[in-house]
Image (spheres, helix red, strand yellow):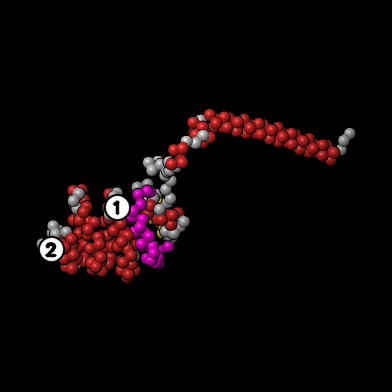
Amino acid sequence: KRSYAEIRVLWRCAIEKQSNSNDRTSSSTQVKHRTAVQRSKSSSLTSSPEAARRAHPRPSDKLNPKTINPFGEQPRAPSAFAAIYSQGGIPCRLVHGSVKHRLQWECQPETLPFDPLLITLAEGLRETKHPYTFVSKEGFRELLLVKDAPEKAIPLLPRLIPVLKAALVHSADEVFERGLSALVQLSAVVGPSLNGHLKLLLTSLSKRLMDKKFKEPITSALQKLEQHGGSASLIIIKSKIPTYCSICS
């Protein structure tokens, strides 16, 4: 009779032998399968017209090299805002609610520096995909609600205004609407400090004013700009949009 230890050794050897046999069988099957697939691909490639052209290039192929199809769908790199958001560069995240969405900040907005966060959020106003549209719009609004927002935002106006203008000249209506809303929010915070930059923005508003669907929201925005900017803003607005009627008239 064999001892228990010998039986265990024999059992282990049998299992290893069976495993090795299965591996060899599987490996052989895989090799045969790959060979068959390669032969099939080789056969289909050599019989295709494209393969025939490569084997016997035409003289015109040298004169007309293959170029990228301008009408084909090209892969797009993520926008700067999307890349920054995905890397955690925006210190807030979208929280989906049953009724409406909200932002959850990693820390209190009052403790956050506006440079460059406010400018980055303004750049995100040109986004057209979720969740970037909501994060940029709501983040911009909530950041301007902090107590010391005027002191933080006014020094950034020279860099912030061109970004807002890019949203106002965007071809997408929803982007323009977000830019217009952000402009009104900014004017409420910085007041007359915005007057020196109004001319850069009013041209875009004047062009959109031709569209009937934007006449009312733009007129309302101009009234808010006048209200926050004072009498000096009225002179600037009238110089660019002569048809504007003052809220004081």
The N terminus sits in image quarter: top right
Query: In the drawing, does residue 153 fall left or right of residue 25?
Result: left
Of mark 2 and mark 1, the one earlier in the sequence is 1
Instruction: Please determine whether, in this image, residue 184 is positioned above or below residue 46.
Output: below
Between 183 and 38, the residue placed more toward the observer is: 38
The C terminus sits in image quarter: bottom left
Magenta span dominant secondary structure: helix
Q: How many marks?
A: 2
Residue 218 in sight from this viewpoint? no
Within the image, what quadrant is residue 241 found in? bottom left
Within the image, what quadrant is residue 202 found in? bottom left
Residue 53 in sight from this viewpoint? yes
- Stretch of the chain drawn in magenta: 107-130
Q: Name the amino acid type tagged 1.
A: His
Residue farthest right in this picture: 1
Residue farthest left in this picture: 249
Between 231 and 227, the residue placed more toward the observer is: 231
Within the image, what quadrant is residue 80 found in? bottom left
Q: Position of residue 242 (x, y in %)?
A: 14, 59
Q: Secondary structure at mark 1?
A: loop
- Residue placed at 74% from the left, 34% from the top? 21
Query: Is residue 69 rendered magenta in the image?
Result: no
Q: Position of residue 109 (x, y in %)?
A: 38, 63
Residue bearing mark 2: 248
Query: In the drawing, does residue 145 fall left or right of residue 83?
Result: left
Residue bearing mark 1: 170
